[in-house]
Amino acid sequence: MAYDKFNILKSSAVPMPIENVDTDQIIPARFLKATERKGFGDNLFRDWRYNTDGTPKEHFVLNNPIYSGKILVGGKNFGSGSSREHAAWAVYDYGFRCVVSSFFADIFRNNCLNVGVLPVQVTPEFLDQIFKAIEADPKTKLEVNLPQQSITILATGESENFDINGYKKQNMLNGFDDIDYLLNIKEGIQKFAENTPL
Amino acid sequence: MSKTLFDKVWDSHVVKHIENGPDVLFIDRHLVHEVTSPVAFLGLKNRGIKVLYPERTFATADHNTPTRNQHLPVKDPLSANQLRALEENAKAHNIPYWGLGHEKNGIVHVIGPENGITVPGATIVCGDSHTSTHGAFGAIAFGIGTSEVEMVLSTQCIMQPKPKKMRININGTLSKAVTPKDVALFIISKLTTSGATGYFVEYAGDVFQNMSMEGRMTVCNLSIEMGARGGMIAPDETTFNYIKGREYAPKGADWDKAMTYWETLYTDADAIFDKELTFEASEIEPMITYGTNPGMGMGIKNDIPLAEAVEGGVATYKKSLEYMAFNEGEAMIGKPIDFVFLGSCTNGRIEDFRAFASIVKGRKKADNVTAWLVPGSHKVEAAIKEEGILDILTDAGFELREPGCSACLAMNDDKIPAGKYAVSTSNRNFEGRQGPGARTLLASPLVAAAAAVTGKVTDPRELMEEIYA
């Protein structure tokens, strides 16, 4: 599915300094019953965000009006657990385009790249600096520069580079998905399949 | 050049390597279920294309299905709609579909092996992280997201960089009441839930060689819980004997040809892993978890660790114990529990029901416990009846449900109520995993059975003297 191109993103960020945020928290299983990709942002972090009667939990960061922006900053091992792509959809649909952490779970990272959310892995020290910068000023802005593969805390100028493979980088810059690529080499795949018995 | 088992299978499936990018990996078998597939099928519809190899694709309904009265229409309209979508998609694309009530219906990772779909040396994917289960056969098997489900449906390929390789060796003999589930929970407690992220794991050593196929499936199933994309065990006589004669397994000359290939599937003596870990079987005790991720586990007789003794964030650790309403330093033994869940792709097979029955036989379910016993498939259900296990369970006051994922992820009505404690044989103890506010203690079928008859966390060894003396 097509997504918006990603180039340079300057935005304030929402801090979530919790480790091992799993995809069951990002979107609980009972919200996976849809047959279309619609409305998942409403249930992003559902059980941390809302009480059982549907009223917002005032202490949860997404309900705190002083925090906003297109960047979500999470603790170590973000996105562990279930392979549900709905978690990445929910992050995107809510309005985030980038998730920053010191460590990502494998499948979640992949899913993000496939739906147009840029996972930016930084060192634990830099993650700490980001959390401190947001604590000092909730409106502080980060710049995520995909062409240069860098992330900068604009207030202090502190910056770090991040990894992304060249192929995925081009996809994100252009809003392409893997299926377009695979469909283009379909004949080669079919030839391969002939030599690969069931 | 020397290769690992993983290298041999991965390399033989690379259609194309992209410089500074992923490999295009050919997928032999694709398992599909109702929850992660509808948006992928919608993608195919929007592009106006069909499933490329329906004969390599198998569909079942499991995640979102009731475990009672499956012969009646599904009550929840959203669930019913999702099941209908899968049925229609399977029909439109000529994919075999084993829906509710079908004799082959069951949890996707139970029915793959059961029907001979899972074979050594194959690449197997499914939109479910516990696809790692199939690695027990020496297959490369892992979970994928819905975009990748769409890729496999439309081109039979996915695009991923080759992961790093890790080998986990465990030698020696397992102690009494230590099951494959305990082995896996032990490894995860040592590695943490992110210790194997970026790696594909091979399990090697006496413990795995001596393990049954079902035990190997339990171990490989839980690979994802240490962050690994998947885990695998080299195929051997145990593997071949399990597969032979199953419906989709190769037959006659095809079997001989397959065996020639399968017998090459082992790690060469001097092959190199990026990381290698070794444990002793005697270190492992019956395990139980006390927190909100599968890495927060320990020997059942131990005390909950103090926050200062734990690696990682103290705040996250305390938040976890607060959710569980447990305190640092407390014993788990003797804690009252409310629910027991036997089932899931981790522990929903016949050996798990045999183990559970071995403890409850001649005893009674504790009055304070609600027990949900959910077979992994109709075939497991049939075996439970044939082997007389159902009689043992019924005499002890238990009731058997119909197959499905059930309370493992609580998408259906099988939800543990808020604040209640459940000893579960499933795979995740995340906050709310088994229902909003539910508190999960992951454990083996033996520990679950001991809890079910005593109403509290109990060391199963205390109930096993007469069997093992």
Image: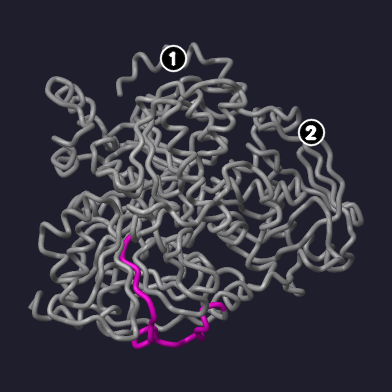
Amino acid on which the number 2 mark rests in the picture: Pro
Instruction: Count neighbours of disc 1 (C-alpha within 10 A) and say few if under 14, some if 14 to 19, many if 20 or more.
Output: some
Query: Split into 4 quadrants, where in the image is the N terminus of chain A?
Result: top right
Would residue B210 be found to the left or right of residue B156 on screen? left
**Residue carrying label 1:** A190
Instruction: Count neighbours of disc 2 (C-alpha within 10 A) and say few if under 14, some if 14 to 19, many if 20 or more.
Output: few
**How many discs mark residues in the rendered view?**
2
**Residue carrying label 2:** A147
Is residue B337 part of the magenta span, yes or no? yes
Query: Marks 2/1: CA distance?
Result: 35 Å
Q: Residue at x 23, y 61 (%)?
A: B352
Q: Residue at x 55, y 51 (%)?
A: A33
User: What chain letter is assigned to the residue under label 2?
Assistant: A
Q: Residue at x 34, y 88 (%)?
A: B334
Q: Considering depth in this image, is A65 or B232 the residue closer to the camera?
A: A65
Dominant secondary structure of the residues highlighted in magenta in the image: loop
User: What chain letter is assigned to the residue under label 1?
Assistant: A
Whole-percent x, y for residue B56 in the image: 36, 27
Extreme-right residue of the structure: A155
Residue B345 can be seen in this image: no
Q: Considering depth in this image, is A135 or B364 the residue closer to the camera?
A: B364
Q: Secondary structure at mark 1?
A: helix
Q: Which mark is residue B15?
A: none
Magenta range: B323-343
Amino acid on which the number 1 mark rests in the picture: Gln
